[in-house]
Amino acid sequence: MIAERIRQARLAAGFTQEQLADALHMTKQVISKYENGRSEPTASIIMKLAQALDRNPAYFLREPQIQVSWLGYRSRSSLGQRAREGIQYRAEAYAEQYVTLAEALAVEHIEALPPRQPIHDVEAADDLAMSVRVAWSLGEQPLDDVTTLIESKGGVVFGEQNAPDVRFDGLSGWIDAIRPVIVLNLAMPVDRRRFSLAHELAHLLMDDSTNHHESVEAFANRFAGAFLVPASAARRELGDRRRHVDLEELALLKQIYGLSIAGWVYRAADLDIISRAMSQRLWAEMSRRGWRKGEPPLFKAEETPTRLRQMVLRAHAEGIISRAQANDLCPGCLPPPADQPLSPRDLMRLPPEERQRLLAEATATYDEDDVELLEAFGEDDIVE
């Protein structure tokens, strides 16, 4: 157990065995022995491992509280195995914290999903998306926040902040075979996050055993488009049949439904609202404008997991967990005491947006004396 926990924590932290060994002033061979169970670390070594890997020492000594069954990655081939495992283990650590806190608060509501079923054509994928909307009483209206929606139904959404740019698309699985978990890449634009969430939801609902990978991905994409924009809504907005559609019109619909312009082109073509020839002209126009790599306008929504933070704040306010336990479950979720500034380690554990906000506030408080003091240092005085 300790061996596997060390390996998981190392990969979650993004360390190679050599990097962890250097941080602990050890050899790679010693770390390898710890991870394959041929040697067991002493209590003092566990303390050093905990500090280097930013874990509570108890993490290495307790059995995992959950079992996650992953369904598979969506990523580019350039995303290596170590990066994939790091994402997986970070998500598992988050899910373990989430479930532990949910049990402490007796928050065990998990909304029923339609049973997994085989999907053999795109029309069935459309029907499956609509069945989820019906089961969750969503009607046919635009969805404000897909992340919050999935969390409100009992699903766990982990926001991956360390994925290398957008080479990682998504990951989904089941916690103890009953609670869905989806990994969301926060490096992606918001509209792409929404589509990825819906795509992963499809994987949780489809029985993929009888289909080729390419077909499964096509069906999941069709589900995602239908979940964000039901067929009736698409026809209501665009009409039953169009000879021409402007990109500016699709840009407006993007702001309403949170589906990208590219997603709208696919959706309109899939539903035969526009011809394939018309869709090709739209693709060509998007390429001419440089919108295939990044399209305006930005869709304004959060699409960031908040449920764990909310549970931590509630549990701490009710005295169920201590400040130390709160910081262990959700680093940076609690504001520091008014008379206690953040340490550099605590600052780096905050979400990037919160970290930048605090740094900006601190910068705004500098006065001329502070600036003169900083300018008194030369380049040789500056260390990383």
Image (cartoon, helix red, strand yellow):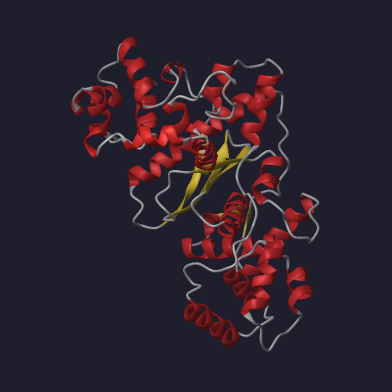
Of 37 and 286, nearer the camera is 286
Image coordinates of residue 224 in percent, x first then y, are 62, 60
Whether residue 102 can be seen here: no
Residue in front for this viewpoint, 196 or 200: 196
118 on left or right of 344: right
Where residue 59 sits: x, y (%)? Answer: 45, 20
Residue drawn at 32 percent across, 11 percent down: 44
Q: Within the image, what quadrant is residue 206 found in?
A: bottom right
Q: Is residue 235 left or right of residue 87?
A: right
Residue 252 image position (x, y, % from top left)? 69, 71
Residue 84 against residue 281 in the figure, above or below: above
Number of marks in picture: 0
Q: Relative to 163, does residue 167 appear above or below in the rendering?
A: below
Whether residue 123 is visible to the viewer of this picture, yes or no, is yes
In the image, 156 versus 282, the foreground residue is 282
Name the residue at 57% across, 54% down.
193
Q: Quadrant of residue 118?
A: bottom right
Image coordinates of residue 162 in percent, x first then y, are: 43, 43
In the rendered image of this protein, does residue 376 appear above or below residue 142? above
Looking at the image, which residue is at 42% across and 28% down? Answer: 344
Location of the N terminus (image quadrant):
top left
Residue at 36% of width from left, 25% of height from top? 6
- Quadrant in which the C terminus appears: top left
